[in-house]
Image: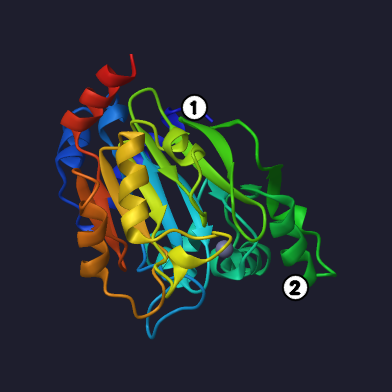
Amino acid sequence: MTPSMWRGTTRSRMRAHGTKSRFSRKLASTPSTSSWASVWHWTVRSTGAYPESGQACSGFLIDWDGFRVVLDLGYAPLPRLLAHVPDADAHAVVITHEHPDHCIDLHGLFRIRRYGPATAGQVALYCPAGVLARLEGLEPDADLRSVFDVHDLPGSYQLGPFALSCRELPHIVPNVGVRLSTQTAAIAYTGDTGPDPLLAELGRNADLYIVDASDRPGESDQPVRNLLTAAEAGQWAAKAGAARLLLTHFWPGNDRQAAILAAQRAFGGEVFAAEQDLQISLATDHARSTQQRDR
Ligand SMILES: [Zn+2]
């Protein structure tokens, strides 16, 4: 896919949703340049394990000039995605691991694409093998590859403007931390993970680091660690040198403000708590500074 095939869609979508960010104005004035200025993403409240009332588990949308990548689809982010993107028309879906709070809405996406109105065809799906196995258990009589163009993780791929790279991180099942980089910006996402030195590598100088901050009661006393606390999320984001930290995968009922404060004890950059329909624009100035840092 060439850049010209996706640039136009971002502008119309921004108008439809009333987005008034700096980069949308920039795009309106210079529609054929400026891909460096137009990354943004949207997320839902993002609990781990199971959803809270009226809320969803993990699910993120990254939009770079209209090239849309979905990161994880747990319990219930799909209806929110549909509210923003008709027919959930993403160019690629990346799933970190097979736990249902990270992948179960793939089943809904499969059915939309198989039985719903005609759409753009196959969706590129990047995931560990266990994700597909779970989905096959739900649809034993259907050919999943009629909808999904499947690529195994871990691996390295080019997704439109994004270079996708991975780090295998410790969890109960195989979990792949992912990093999406363009020439001027990088976003990294841990999925679910315990503490591991690779976390500093995965998020190295990222413009945005999305980190599991489960804070399950007694988490830091577990003999084998499969999740992080918010304080640890802040520590790893600081070690990585990330610019911004988005905390996610809260244990249901956890106090988000307390999680932010815990992360800020070690991390000096901006800290966000994932919540429904949160949008974060990676500002032009920061994209420039990141470009300089990476040289
Ligand atoms: Zn998990």
Where on the image, by quarter, is ligand 1?
A: bottom right
- Tell me what residue is drawn at x 56 percent, y 63 percent: 223
Q: Quadrant of the N terminus?
A: top right
- Indicate left or right for 43 with 158 as reference: left
Q: Quadrant of the C terminus?
A: top left
Whole-angstrom CA distance, mark 2 to mark 1, is 35 Å
Residue that mark 2 sits on: 138
Q: Is residue 113 above or below residue 35?
A: below
- Tell me what residue is drawn at x 51 percent, y 44 percent: 196
Q: Earlier in the sequence, mark 2 or mark 1?
A: 1
Between residue 82 and residue 287, name the one nearer to us. Answer: 287
The kind of residue on which mark 2 rests is Leu
Q: Which mark is residue 2?
A: 1
Q: Which mark is residue 147?
A: none
Between residue 25 and residue 228, name the one nearer to us. Answer: 228
x and y percentages locating residue 185 in the rendered image: 34, 30
The kind of residue on which mark 1 rests is Thr
Mark 2 residue element = helix
Q: Residues within 10 Å of mark 2 (few under 14, many from 20)?
A: few
